[in-house]
Image (cartoon, rainbow, N blue to C red):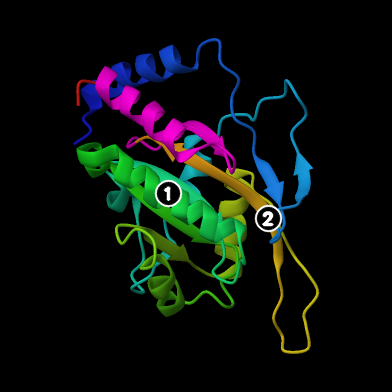
Amino acid sequence: MFRIGTALALAGAVFALNSGATYAHDAHRNGHGQNVAAAPDGDRRPAISKADVATIYGLTDQHGVPVNRDRFKGRFSFVVFGYTACPDVCPTAMTHVASIMEKLGPYADYMLPVFVTFDPARDTAEVLRDYVSHFDKRTLALTGSAEAIKAVQQGYGVLSVPGPKDEDGSYFISHTAAKYLIAPDGSHLQSFSHDDPPEQIAVYLKKIFSRMGM
């Protein structure tokens, strides 16, 4: 479990791993994997503040239970945004998350996969519960009111743009495809792009845990 006394060790571990490296950029993609917008070369995404991270507290999980900060204590959170009707990008992202958890082995006990929907109108608790069960069953899936989801999106700096509805009422959503690593104390450590290999992310996480003496 994460203790306050490990905060300096964590900061040092992340600094050592990131020094001299280029931060991963957010990849803004639509439901078919095409770019919507991309950060320019050399640009770095600003860190998300603890207040921004905290916007996720107060959403509702896949069992209809409101979550608070206590649900995230003691573990690192690996946050992914998406929606269950997404045809390819979101299933790929969730498959990557499941692969990362598997590759972490015993270190996976320190991780909490989190899936936040862009589509609360369709992604009810029941729908989310069924969806994440096909990937890693340890995943915490979150939904909420349209206003609450919008606040989380603004906090994390992610975009979503619903497309036109088909005759049957279905629609795709163009959206940011990125993964966010959040420390147990609520600080944002790193962002990973949709294209970062799970193997690479798992190695990065193992190095953090190793440097912290876990």
Reply above or below: 157 against 144: above
Which residue occupies the foreground of this view, 32 or 69?
32
> Disc 2 marks which amino acid?
His
Image quadrant occupied by the N terminus: top left
Which residue occupies the foreground of this view, 79 or 50?
79
Which residue occupies the foreground of this view, 36 or 146?
36
Reply above or below: 61 against 126: above
For the point 61% across and 56% down, the residue is 89
What span is in magenta?
184-211
Q: Which mark is residue 175?
A: 2
Image location (x, y in percent) of residue 196: 55, 36
Q: Are marks 2 and 1 in contact (CB under 8 Å)?
A: no
Q: Quadrant of residue 213?
A: top left
Image location (x, y in percent) of residue 140: 36, 59
Graded by Cα atoms within 10 Å as few (under 14), some (14 to 19) or many (20 or more), the crowding at tag 1 reads: many
Is residue 208 rendered magenta in the image? yes
Circle 2 SS class: strand
For the point 52% across and 52% down, the residue is 93
Reply above or below: 121 against 74: below
Q: Quadrant of residue 164?
A: bottom right
Circle 1 SS class: helix
Is residue 201 rendered magenta in the image? yes
Image location (x, y in percent) of residue 210: 26, 22
Q: Which residue is mark 1?
A: 97
